[in-house]
Amino acid sequence: AMDILQDMSDRDLRELRATMPLRLAPRGTVFYGPCGPDVLFLIISGRVELYRESRDGRHLTLAIVGEKTFFGEMSVIGQRMVGTCAVALEDSVTCALSRDDVQHLMTDHPSVAVRIVEGLAQRLQQTRDALEQMAFNDVTGRVAGLLLRLADDKDGVEGYSHQELSAMIGCLRESLTVVLDRFKESGALSIGRRRVDILDRSQLDRVVQHWASIP
């Protein structure tokens, strides 16, 4: 079911699975710190946050990766993500491939290499979009864009505290709460414990499009 392995045969997948021990990572597990790993992690289930932290403790989320995807890949292909950390946002199941494992896999199955490159390109674009929103949007626009990114095609965002959401867009928790309450009053959102349901996606879309149209 892994995206990067979808072109492999059932036999090859069974052989690969036999060499990959699974690891249960409870919520809050730190996979690696600023030095980065020399492994590629496959996420069987759960979600992982990739982030950077400044010396004074400020937090910047680079990406949220979910099941069937991967992370830690930059060091494996020779381009280290210096300063990047990874932590489980919820109970997750992963398995890890060493540098040699990945290189052999990419050599024996070129389609895997193509899928990894595609994944890297998509993640880079997501990071650029997030940084662009932080640079040019006000807090309202950044909150709307974040909720749409996290929800994708779903009706809501679940499993994040207000503190975690505010860290993802570089604003104060109090500022995020104010914006969420405004969207709630307008009928765009319903807010529960660690859950935000999107009731009117068009309102969020209009806010994001407004900022995107400003030269």
Image (cartoon, rainbow, N blue to C red):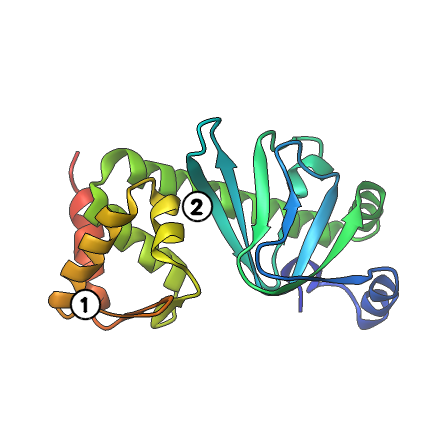
In the image, residue 189 sits, relative to residue 178, either above or below, namely: below
Left or right, 194 with reference to 69:
left
Q: Residue at x 84, y 62 (%)?
A: 16
What amino acid type is highlighted by mark number 2? Gln
- x and y, in percent, of residue 102 in the image: 79, 47
Pointer 2: what residue?
A: 126
Residue 136 appears in view: yes
Q: Secondary structure at mark 2?
A: helix
Residue depicted at x 79% and y 53%: 109
Residue nearest the viewer, comparing 164 with 74: 164
Residue 84 placement (x, y as % from top left): 57, 36
Q: Nearer the viewer, residue 175 or 104?
A: 175
Instruction: Quadrant for residue 184, please give it.
Output: bottom left
Q: Residue furthest top?
A: 55
Determine which of the numbered discs, if any, sits on residue 188 in the image.
Answer: 1
SS at mark 1?
A: loop
Q: Give whichever of discs 2 and 1 has the lower sequence position.
A: 2
